[in-house]
DNA sequence: CTCCTGTGGTATCCAATGGGTACCAAGTGC
DNA sequence: GCACTTGGTACCCATTGGATACCACAGGAG
């Protein structure tokens, strides 16, 4: 019925490319979504190979069923993950797998993960230093 | 076909290196923090050069004062951003800048941003397809 | 047979978090 | 004096995340 019920597909020209700092930028909306705790963890986990719902729930420690199904649904909608149902299996088997597009994203976030793993020491050190200074300031103030 | 995920239990006090999937993993805690909307945007903005509080607030569209000061404080604590106060200036000038460590992080998240910018088209296409299918299923059900 | 488990979710509720607004103190322009 | 700037903090409410319960169905234990 209403053609205008959703974000206009046209965008006549100006894509605001490079301006992720504008709230309206579509790239920023995408960035907001992929720069997400569970998204990153799930994609990384799926890079190891296809997995099933409850397997993911067990493997990704701390994820709730709600967030898992929600995140997987978004990833599927974004074409990053595929969902295949085997209805013939006994209690129904649902398998999630990375799509090729999802694979390119995993490759793109890998440097971030590697950074976290290699720099965690420096960050922790910075934190201790900061907390010490902080404590000093507080005791000085009171 | 990979049998995947021998992330089985049985840690005997080992480093958990590479196991970001455990909730206790310190790397995962760090990853949760940097895989954050405002963190990514602020770091990217600061890569352009040092900036002041209200300048950042103006430039990063949509960030609230609260989230800005909160995020900056965390970044400072993590040693990714430095905060320098010029008390001599008229209404006090506070300048935020990337530290060398922060610079390495920006480099590490850049691929993710580039991915978002280059693949946004494919994602949008996947979304339309998904939404169409979804709508079809719903109208079929009702 | 009933009970319990596992499968893949959805629905519901509540706590935590994010964001908007107001306010502060100090200085400057009008 | 009044309003505006600076860099924040304090407070409140809306949105979100997370825990829990529940569903339908099938298989195995007892």
Image: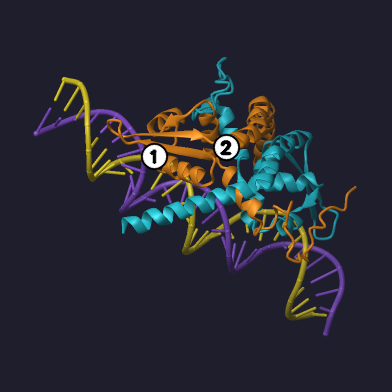
Chain colours: A cyan, B orange, C yellow, D purple
- Please determine whether, in this image, residue B79 is positioned above or below residue B25: above
Question: Which residue is located at x 51 percent, y 29 percent?
Answer: B45
Q: Position of residue A51 (x, y in %)?
A: 79, 51
- Distance, label 1 to label 2, CA atoms, is 22 Å
Question: Which residue is located at x 51 percent, y 38 percent?
Answer: B81
- Please determine whether, in this image, residue D28 is positioned above or below residue B62: below
Instruction: Indicate left or right for D14 with A89 as reference.
Output: left
Instruction: Indicate left or right for B47 with A79 as reference.
Output: left
Q: Position of residue B34 (x, y in %)?
A: 58, 43
Give whichever of discs 1 and 2 has the lower sequence position. Answer: 1
Q: Secondary structure at mark 1?
A: helix
The numbered dot on residue B65 is 1
Residue topped by disc 2:
B102
Closer to the camera in the image, D25 or B72: B72
Q: Position of residue A62 (x, y in %)?
A: 64, 58
The numbered dot on residue B119 is none
Closer to the camera in the image, B69 or B115: B69
Question: Which residue is located at x 88 percent, y 49 percent?
Answer: B2
Q: Position of residue B119 (x, y in %)?
A: 68, 27
Q: Chain of mark 2?
A: B
Any part of residue A134 in sight: yes
Quarter containing the C terminus of chain A: bottom left
């Amino acid at each position: 019925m209403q053609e205008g019920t959703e974000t206009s597909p046209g965008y006549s020209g100006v894509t605001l490319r490079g301006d992720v700092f504008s709230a309206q930028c579509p790239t920023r909306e995408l960035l907001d979504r992929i720069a997400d705790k569970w998204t990153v963890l799930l994609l990384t986990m799926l890079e190891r190979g296809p997995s099933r719902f409850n397997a993911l729930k067990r493997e990704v420690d701390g994820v709730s069923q709600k967030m898992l199904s929600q995140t997987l649904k978004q990833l599927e909608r974004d074409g990053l993950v595929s969902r295949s149902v085997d209805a013939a299996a006994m209690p129904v088997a649902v398998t999630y797998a990375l799509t090729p597009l999802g694979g390119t994203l995993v490759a793109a976030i890998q440097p971030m993960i590697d950074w976290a793993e290699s720099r965690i020491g420096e960050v922790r050190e910075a934190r201790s230093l900061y907390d010490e200074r902080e404590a000093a300031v507080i005791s000085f103030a009171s």
